[in-house]
Image (cartoon, rainbow, N blue to C red):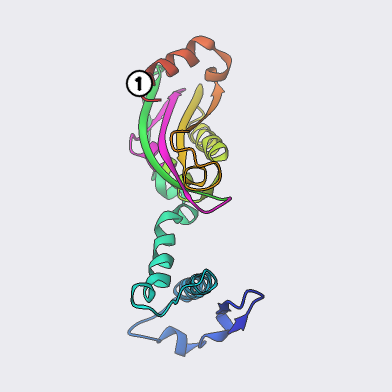
Amino acid sequence: MLKNESNIDLVWLNDLPVGEDVENRGNGHHSEENVQETVRKGNIESAVRSILVNVGEDPERQGLQGTPDRIARMYDEVLGGYSMDLEKLVNGALFDVAYDEMIVVKDIEFYSMCEHHMLPFFGRAHVAYIPSDKVIGLSKIPRIVEMFARRLQVQERMTRQIADTIDEILNPQGVAVVIEGNHMCSMMRGVKKQEASMVTSAMLGCFKQSDKTRNEFLSHLRGSI
């Protein structure tokens, strides 16, 4: 175990038993992935304990004793997008359909974490595309939004990542993404504006080239943003 400059205890793989001791530790076989997960979780817990001490709290008091573990497990959920695999997420749900009109999936709720202050931002995403020869399963678009939302993010980049990913998967005539977000980093700190929201958009292909196509998409969002 090592101490870094912040006096946080860091556990490295070399600090854990190796060989059969690792594999047989506990009640069953632990793969290398399991060991890395244990190390990662332990490092997060140590970091949280250090934060608690340095903000003037006692990590051993009753209400905080389980907090490092809870936060480590929370990060697995709210930052789970890093471990999502796009190919597995789509799972072959691409279908040949003779359809060349606009498809819109709107009001997709999302929750993300601002990479600047690690505070939440949340809102709704609206996604449209015009197929060339394939459509994607309806549930896959919200899952793609989720994959990029559950990371440390900025809204501008997330908007473009969603659009670029759908464009890459489908090679459609065009893709459009509009996201409206409320950012806790500007609501509970800093400027402290409770009603301000941020709208970002990414237009690709015919949505960028054609005012008529873009306006048709935006007309579907009236009342949503």
At 36% from the left and 29% from the top, the residue drawn is 105
Using the image as rendered, state which of residue 219 and residue 138 is in the foreground: 219
Q: Which amino acid, by three-letter code, is at mark 1?
A: Gly
* Residue range of the region highlighted in magenta in the rendering: 116-144
Residue 162 placement (x, y as % from top left): 50, 37
Residue 67 in which image quadrant: bottom left
At 52% from the left and 35% from the top, the residue drawn is 159
User: Does the stretch in magenta take in 105?
Assistant: no
Check disc 1 and report the residue beneath it. Answer: 223
In the rendered image of this protein, does residue 123 appear above or below residue 19? above
Using the image as rendered, state which of residue 19 and residue 61 is in the foreground: 61
For the N terminus, which image quadrant?
bottom right
Residue 179 placement (x, y as % from top left): 46, 32
Residue 91 placement (x, y as % from top left): 38, 45
At 40% from the left and 87% from the top, the residue drawn is 24
Is residue 89 visible to the viewer in this orientation of the structure?
yes
For the C terminus, which image quadrant?
top left
In the rendered image of this protein, does residue 184 appear above or below residue 224? below
